Amino acid sequence: TQLLEQSPQFLSIQEGENLTVYCNSSSVFSSLQWYRQEPGEGPVLLVTVVTGGEVKKLKRLTFQFGDARKDSSLHITAAQPGDTGLYLCAGDYTGTASKLTFGTGTRLQVTL
Amino acid sequence: EAQVTQNPRYLITVTGKKLTVTCSQNMNHEYMSWYRQDPGLGLRQIYYSMNVEVTDKGDVPEGYKVSRKEKRNFPLILESPSPNQTSLYFCASGTRYSTGELFFGEGSRLTVL
């Protein structure tokens, strides 16, 4: 089983602050996804990155895929309470959905 | 509305009492999968299915069974549950390719006493 590490595990910040979450592996990803999970619900896809060096933006969220496709980051600008949740990265090493490996997650709390 | 439906959402049972968690999707997806989520361990894949009658083990299959007789349904069977199977379970469906979105159910919280 491939190991996919996320950091930090927990993050508590105030509204308006910026933050970055990291997702790292020792192996090369075929593709990588970021999901957000809210309490009592299943994860919901935020973005998929495929090409090394790729940057995608979703409103205040910026996702980057490392040049070597072994790591990814999620940057949130001016965090809001609605950003609170568990952020999960999911990497694929094989090119098929069957072997998505999920990271342990980063739990984000944004307070007023 | 496109959705993945799991039942039951909550269940408390006792060791050894067989149970089934149902999962149904209405998106005509070929791929379906079961995960368990435990604190500090993230989502771990139990079993997956690439199509009807095609199933395979994930990373933590011990103590579980699945079947895929119809495209829309993918039940998870615990023949003899044990306390270490206490967990939050998620069913997901999607396309066969990892660049496609995985759609998750709302989860089934299982407690085995």
Image (cartoon, rainbow, N blue to C red):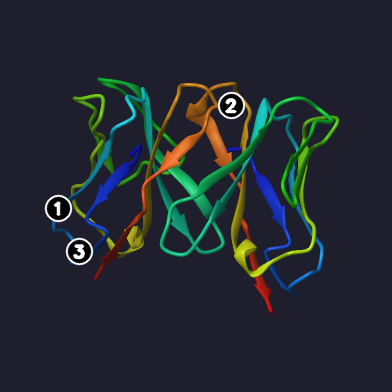
Residue A26: percent from left, percent from top: 76, 38
Alpha carbons under labels 3 and 2: distance apart: 39 Å
User: In which quadrant of the rendered view does residue B5 lie?
Assistant: top left
Residue A86 seen in the figure? yes
Disc 3 residue type (three-letter): Thr
User: In which quadrant of the rendered view does residue B57 lie?
Assistant: top left
Label 3 sits on a secondary structure element that is: loop
Label 1 sits on a secondary structure element that is: loop
Badge 2: how crowded within 10 Å, few (<14), some, or many (20+)?
Answer: many
Up/down of B64 relative to A41, above or below: above
Q: Which residue is mark 1?
A: B18
Disc 1 residue type (three-letter): Lys
Q: Please give the chain letter of the residue carrying mark 1.
A: B
Location of the N terminus of chain B by quadrant is top left
Front residue (pair A52, A61): A61
Residue shown at 20% from the left, 25% from the top: B70
**Residue B99: assigned label:** 2
Residue shown at 55% from the left, 34% from the top: A100
Alpha carbons under labels 2 and 1: distance apart: 36 Å
Q: Nearer the viewer, mark 3 or mark 2?
A: 2
Residue A89 appears left or right of B2: right
**Label 3 with label 1: CB-CB less than 8 Å:** no
Alpha carbons under labels 3 and 1: distance apart: 9 Å
Residue A89 appears left or right of A15: left
